[in-house]
Amino acid sequence: MSTSNGVNISKGIDWTMVLLYAILVSIGILCIFMVEYRSGTSWVTSFLTGKTNYSKQLLFAGICGLIAIFILLSDSKLYTAFANLLYAFGILLMLLTFVIGKNINGSRSWIPLAGGFNLQPAELCKIFAALALAKFISRQDIDFSKPKSQIIAAVIALSPAALSILQNETGLALVYASFFIVMFREGLPPWILIVGFSFGALVVATLVVEPNLLAIILTAIAGLTIYVMRRMIKRNKNLLVFILLIWAVCVGVQRFAVPYIFNNVFQCYQSQRIYSMVGKDYDCSKNRSAKNERAADKAVKKPDDYNVRQSKIAIGSGGIVGRGFLKGTQTRGKYVPEQHTDFIFTSLGEAFGFIGCFVFLGIYLLMLFRIITIAERQRSTFSRVYAYSVASIMFFHITVNVCMTIGLFPIIGIPLPLISYGGSSLLTFTILIFILIRLDADRQMVLR
């Protein structure tokens, strides 16, 4: 730890980021309080007992505050020096969950700690992956325009995602895809993102459009493309082969790959959630996980639709200005499942309405813009890549969680940054943000 940094802890610190962090953490504790507080009990006493989720979140916030101070007192060079070691440690922790992990809600991704607390290594590994990616891209011998460097960067980003999938944590695995935004900023070819978005559009079209009709549409598009580009094709026959190859891949994905993934790779409930997002029903009798008729019958009840339906009712009941503090009937009545974690946004929507949600999301937007501003003023590639990693992770979490609560995205268990209940999540985002603040304070240095 650097003594000089300790003496001048406030030197170079972006206090705007610190303030936005403190505001969001406070809003998070307030939201959990709105959900769980029961009238007739002393709120001061209930906060001090440590038995309620909002009192535990306050304790988590206190611990995170101490960790934040420790990070601000540390030397920025520590994060470049130990980036790869921390990444290896994070991967090791994720592997340990297969041996000593605790199963919570069907996911074996937690390591039990003393005092009844649990650690989710996949959350912490987001920090380590961001540092390792920044370390790799900032190396002087790395030319990120070369495919080899891009593949290595993708492996760094996606290795924790693969382990998350094996832990049955699909939601957290998807978060690691946000690192491709960072790689795009650093020189990843745009066509890779275009292919990714096109594949996503094809998957959605496969779910929405009848298979034979979609095959005809794809064939018509290929035929029209060949007609429009006929003169170019006459000069270069390889162009025709390329168009026909793309057509064959698209039809293959639509007719065989997507059905196989939904019926044999995904669990019944996962396929059901995705289908319900586009307003379709999934037949679980086709799914490998539906071993008997009872499993198929259970799918008809559509329990996941209940979560989203109650979430929409809660947010919609808030109207323009909301029902008011501690006056929400849906969230306080515990009609919304997981309302203190994944569906915490519903408490804001019901209590403070559209205006409250608009202001709240505005705070998030300010933080994201601030992080991007910080990223672009760095002299060091390491600091810039890390800053964009933080922005990408937060953007992914915010977008997916909010869309999830209003039915625009499948329920995949993504917490709302700094708001949702949970020590692992709050600790992860605290460390992510304050390492960024520490690096920014030393932005005149060139770190590698």
Image (cartoon, grey):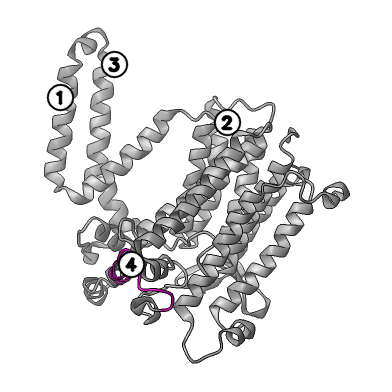
CB-based contact (under 8 Å), mark 3 and mark 2: no
- Report helix, strand or loop for mark 3: helix
Bounds of the magenta segment: 309-326
Q: Amino acid at mark 1?
A: Leu
The residue furthest top is 235
Q: Position of residue 368 (x, y in %)?
A: 52, 46
In space, the residues marked 4 and 1 are separated at their CA atoms by 45 Å
Secondary structure category for the residue under label 4: helix
Disc 2 residue type?
Answer: Ser
In the picture provided, is 348 more to the left or to the right than 438? left
Q: Which of the two labelled residues, at mark 3 and mark 2, occupies the earlier sequence position?
A: 2
Q: Residues within 10 Å of mark 4 (few under 14, many from 20)?
A: many
Label 1 and label 3: CA atoms lie apart by: 17 Å
Mark found first going from the N terminus, 4 or 2 = 2
For label 2, the crowd category at 10 Å Cα-Cα, with few meaning under 14, some 14 to 19 and many 20 or more, is some
Asked where in the image residue 290 lies, by quadrant, the reply is: bottom left
Q: Please name the residue that numbered disc 4 is placed on.
A: 315
Q: Is residue 53 visible?
A: yes
- Work out whether residue 58 or residue 239 is closer to the camera in this orientation and state it: 58
Q: Amino acid under label 4?
A: Ile
In this rendering, would 44 be left or right of 319? right
Instruction: Give the labeled residue for mark 1.
Output: 224
Q: Nearer the viewer, mark 4 or mark 1?
A: 4
Q: Is residue 60 left or right of residue 167?
A: right
Nearest to the eye among marks 4 and 3: give it.
4
Is 322 a magenta residue?
yes
